[in-house]
Image (tube, rainbow, N blue to C red):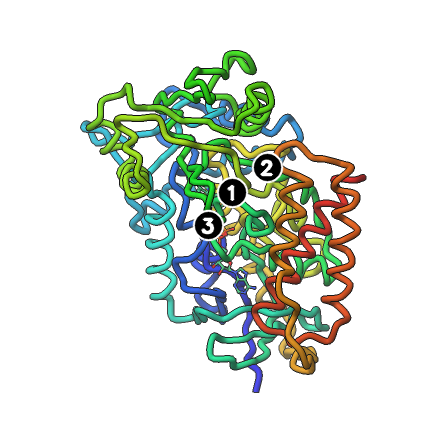
Amino acid sequence: MSENYDVIIAGCGAAGLYAAINLPSTARILILCKRDLPLCNSSLAQGGIAGVYDSPTDSIQYHQNDTLIAGNFKNNVDAVHTLVSEAAQDIEHIIKLGVEFDRNPDGSYHRTLEGGHSHHRIFHHADATGKEITTTLRDHVLSIPNVKVMENTIMCGVKQTKTGYSAFLKTADDVYSTVNCHFMILATGGIGRVYQYTTNSAIATGDGITFAYEMGAKIKNLSYVQFHPTAFNNRQTRECFLISEAVRGEGAHLLNCNKERFMQNYDERLELAPRDVVSHSIILESKRTNSTDFYLDISYKDSEFIKNRFPMIYENLLKQGYDMTKEPVPIYPCQHYLMGGIDVNGNSETTLPNLFACGECSHTGVHGGNRLASNSLLEALVFSRHAANTIAQRLESAPADFEEALFDARLGSKHIPKGIRTETRKILQECYFVIPDKEAAAKGYQRVKEILDDLRTGGYVVDADYVLAKSIVTVAYIILGEVIK
Ligand SMILES: Cc1cc2nc3c(=O)[nH]c(=O)nc-3n(C[C@H](O)[C@H](O)[C@H](O)COP(=O)(O)OP(=O)(O)OC[C@H]3O[C@@H](n4cnc5c(N)ncnc54)[C@H](O)[C@@H]3O)c2cc1C
């Protein structure tokens, strides 16, 4: 027997949770999370959340200008205006829900600086802001009676019906089911796991983008990928530990293989240039010095200040054998964020009726060609609230019944071949890392297309392996298609 809901939200990161919180208590809501609840990119956020709130020197105009400059003016100006002018409202709301941000001795909020920001406007909880926000939002969602949370339940497919959408689910105990809804919100996060090296958590495989693409929704600017300049470089793990931009905000220097500062040769904003500029400069400096050895050095600052300001980063690096209070730490760029995604309007509506997208899987246009630091948690909050408000207005006029789509997913007889994800990640890493290689991308695109055709027609069992592989390959296919255009 299938279950029916007014709203199904796929994703329990900042975007999905905040959408649930902002939906009316009369709505029957299902929220899905394919792995354990804390595992998401939102939990990993270190630096903080940007916003002009209770600040005498800053203004939303400054925040807007910084966002546009960082985005290389490829942003949607209306969406940026919404983002910066509504920031205070959502920051205040999450504070009321219980989120604690660091304060100065006089009780005012401490705000830090990150690359591309002209003012100190990043609210933070030491260097673990995402954990603080998601834990608070999650506790709140778990206490809402009209919200059912399904953890370790992967959405394997979505179909549009006459009355909304049907989703095909699989639990960790291998139980398959179909659920139907009038409104669906995709809040499935980013695509980092399409790359060999990323700061993203294991859930970031672009599932929501793939479902939306398969249903015919418009996907925009998927090749607008952000590479963070300062991931810890242990040259081993796929998930690279991020060393927050706030470390540079507090004065850290970037050093080349000769332990010399070099940003002065590339940009007058030095270490505080926007991320794309810094990553690009590292790659150019790497070519000049013929070395991939780079370092981040804040050891000249007071060691107690460093330990108090960056306790999580300090402890983590110590475990890896580096004391950031005493020595430079090895870093290198890696995939970090997706600016493109499922195209949405100001209400977070996709091009399909009553299908919404918010958070990192969506393309609101706020980030343009390069996201300004700490604007993505903000985007997740502001635009998921817009999705919730729009749905709230339509709930009463929703159809009385629920149509159920048929899924033939259980008909597959064999498992996908091994190595598909590894091969696709290698292709993308080689074809498009910071500076795209168009020639390699043309070849990569053909190979990825072959893999995708096989996944679509090969009669494979639809399990988590299949869903993740198909998502990774679909996302790579769309990105490379844009790169070679
Ligand atoms: C290391 C790191 C540091 C960062 N630091 C900052 C920062 O300081 N400030 C800032 O603004 N941004 C930061 N970001 C970016 C920011 O955290 C993310 O862009 C944002 O939190 C994304 O939120 P989200 O809700 O869209 O996705 P996520 O938080 O990633 O949540 C996605 C959810 O979707 C679920 N899901 C996915 N696919 C399926 C499926 N098929 N079925 C069911 N569920 C599914 C997942 O289980 C998960 O619950 C950082 C990102 C990283 C990786």
Give the mark nearest the N terminus, 1 or 3.
3
Give the mark nearest the N terminus, 3 or 2.
3
Give the mark nearest the N terminus, 2 or 1.
2
Q: How many marks?
A: 3
Between marks 1 and 3, how big is the CA–CA gap?
A: 14 Å
Disc 1 crowd rating (10 Å Cα; few below 14, some 14-19, many 20+) is: many
In the rendering, which numbered label is found on residue 279?
Answer: none
Q: Nearer the viewer, mark 3 or mark 2?
A: 3
From the top left corner, tell me how far across and down residue 51 is, in percent. Answer: 43, 33
Residue 337 relative to residue 473: left or right: left
From the top left corner, tell me how far across and down residue 353 is, in percent. Answer: 70, 60
Q: Nearer the viewer, residue 153 or 480?
A: 480
Vertical side of 164 occupied by 134: above or below? above
Question: Which residue sits at x=78%, y=40%?
Answer: 484
The kind of residue tagged 2 is: Val
Residue matched to label 3: 41
Asked whether disc 2 touches disc 1, contact meaning CB atoms under 8 Å apart, the reply is yes
Say which element carries label 3. helix
Mark 3 close to ligand 1, CB under 8 Å: yes
Question: Which residue sits at x=75%, y=72%?
Answer: 458
Say which element carries label 2. loop
The kind of residue tagged 1 is: Glu
Mark 1 close to ligand 1, CB under 8 Å: yes
